Image (cartoon, grey):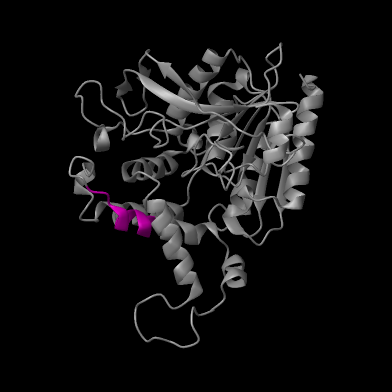
């Protein structure tokens, strides 16, 4: 699409129309669980232009329910852009006039990369619950292979929020020479017992749905929508702060009178049910189970006797760590633990705790101070690497 057409249909700071691409890999990928994938696909999108030196690439790592569509639009009829469009585009924090951005859907996903919905080449049936367990390390190894295929030896920055931030952390440990800068947002180096408990409640909601059929729901022509809906409702409560929910809904009723029953009466009930219903038709149950276990497993310090500073020793790059004051899913204290460990390990780190009422979801939103910190760091990345508009 030419620039005039793009500008007439989309905002000036949008990357405009984008088209997903698929990378196929025939070489087996050994996994941490002891199994391997004989072959697999990764679906991804790119925004901006890779410069001749191939030094301006930025990798975006997504969170639990995220995917490769991080910015722009798939058609002129799209009502909403990609999930991180607020931060990716011309003149935005990740400025596509400067950077070539790669956003990939992780293995085990349900948006085009090989996962439980794909066909097992050995059996000819859908993988379903037989799809191998994944770890953050497995994802990073597969992403490194994608970078090889794209001819990117080193990323100018690797960026991610929540589960995406865990991937950024793992990149700096597994491939330190391939990461020039790391941005870790609203993330933690390991889940608390409370977080693991929330994930288990969500998994049990799905697994106890009569339509789950031990994970073989596709072969039975069913979808465990009730379980997925409940899992999303539980998760969504943890993504918002008490203040955000109070400001948005309070105790407002949908009508003027109490019904004295179990139908939807409060606005917050209506909101959660809507979110659950929408999610249950757009996400795969086996993928949700897998993604939450990936979260649970991540703990780079475990192999070092719990010493996070020792675990971070391989990292070479500068870090930006961002937290949000009302994020009780991954609270600022956990980010501060990471920052302290990075300092103890002798790493360069900048830290910002952003005052926001929006809880964990704040990392997705265009908070002014958050944008200023994020954009300032990325501008420094561009300057240090001599990255200019291609």
> Magenta stretch containing residue 228, yes or no?
yes
Q: In this view of the protein, which residue sits in the foreground, 174 or 363?
A: 363
Quadrant assignment for the N terminus = top right
Residue 307 appears in the rendering: no
Image spot of residue 236 (x, y percent) = 48, 58
Give x and y (percent) for residue 359.
60, 58
- Give the side of residue 110 with respect to residue 76, left or right: left
Residue 121 position within the rendered picture, expressed as x and y whole percent measured from the top left? 25, 21
Q: Is residue 211 above or below residue 321?
A: below
Q: Which quadrant holds residue 328?
A: bottom right
Can the viewer see residue 283 in this picture?
yes
Quadrant location, the C terminus: top right
Residue at x-position 33% and y-position 29%: 33
Across and down, in percent, residue 37 comes to 33, 22
Q: Is residue 304 left or right of residue 244?
A: left
**What range of the chain is rendered magenta?**
222-231
- What kind of secondary structure does the magenta stretch mostly adopt? helix
Q: 70 above or below 209? A: above
The quarter of the displayed image where residue 386 is located: top right
Residue 290: in magenta span: no
Which residue is located at x 82 percent, y 25 percent? 383
Examine the rendered structure and indicate whether residue 151 appears above or below residue 160: above
């Amino acid at each position: 699409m030419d620039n005039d057409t793009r500008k007439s249909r989309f905002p000036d700071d949008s990357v405009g129309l984008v088209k997903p691409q698929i990378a196929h890999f025939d070489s087996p990928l050994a996994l941490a669980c002891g199994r391997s994938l004989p072959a697999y696909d990764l679906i991804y999108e790119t925004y901006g232009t890779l410069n001749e030196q191939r030094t301006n690439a930025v990798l975006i790592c997504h969170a639990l329910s995220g995917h490769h569509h991080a910015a722009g639009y798939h058609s002129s009829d799209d009502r909403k852009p990609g999930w991180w469009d607020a931060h990716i585009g011309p003149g935005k924090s990740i400025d596509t006039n400067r950077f070539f951005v790669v956003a990939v859907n992780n293995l085990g996903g349900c948006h085009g990369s090989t996962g439980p919905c794909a066909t097992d080449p050995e059996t000819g049936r859908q993988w379903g619950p037989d799809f191998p367990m994944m770890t953050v390390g497995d994802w990073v190894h597969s992403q490194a292979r994608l970078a090889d295929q794209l001819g990117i030896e080193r990323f100018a920055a690797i960026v991610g929020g929540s589960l995406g931030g865990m991937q950024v952390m793992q990149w700096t440990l597994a491939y330190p020479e391939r990461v020039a800068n790391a941005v870790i947002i609203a993330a933690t180096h390991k889940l608390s017992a409370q977080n693991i408990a929330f994930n288990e409640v969500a998994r049990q909601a799905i697994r106890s749905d009569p339509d789950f059929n031990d994970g073989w729901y596709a072969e039975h022509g069913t979808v465990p929508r009730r379980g997925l809906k409940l899992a999303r409702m539980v998760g969504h409560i943890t993504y918002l702060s008490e203040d955000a929910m109070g400001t948005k809904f309070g105790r407002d009723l949908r009508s003027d009178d109490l019904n004295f029953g179990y139908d939807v009466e409060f606005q917050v009930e209506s909101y959660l049910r809507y979110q659950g219903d929408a999610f249950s038709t757009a996400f795969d149950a086996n993928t949700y189970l897998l993604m939450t276990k990936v979260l649970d497993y991540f703990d780079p310090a475990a192999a070092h006797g719990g010493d996070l500073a020792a675990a971070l020793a391989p990292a070479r790059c500068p870090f930006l760590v961002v937290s949000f004051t009302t994020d009780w899913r991954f609270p600022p204290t956990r980010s501060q633990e990471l920052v302290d460990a990075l300092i103890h390990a002798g790493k360069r780190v900048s830290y910002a705790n952003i005052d926001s009422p929006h809880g964990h979801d704040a990392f997705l939103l265009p908070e002014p101070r958050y944008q200023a910190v994020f954009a300032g760091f990325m501008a420094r990345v561009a300057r240090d690497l001599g990255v200019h508009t291609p």
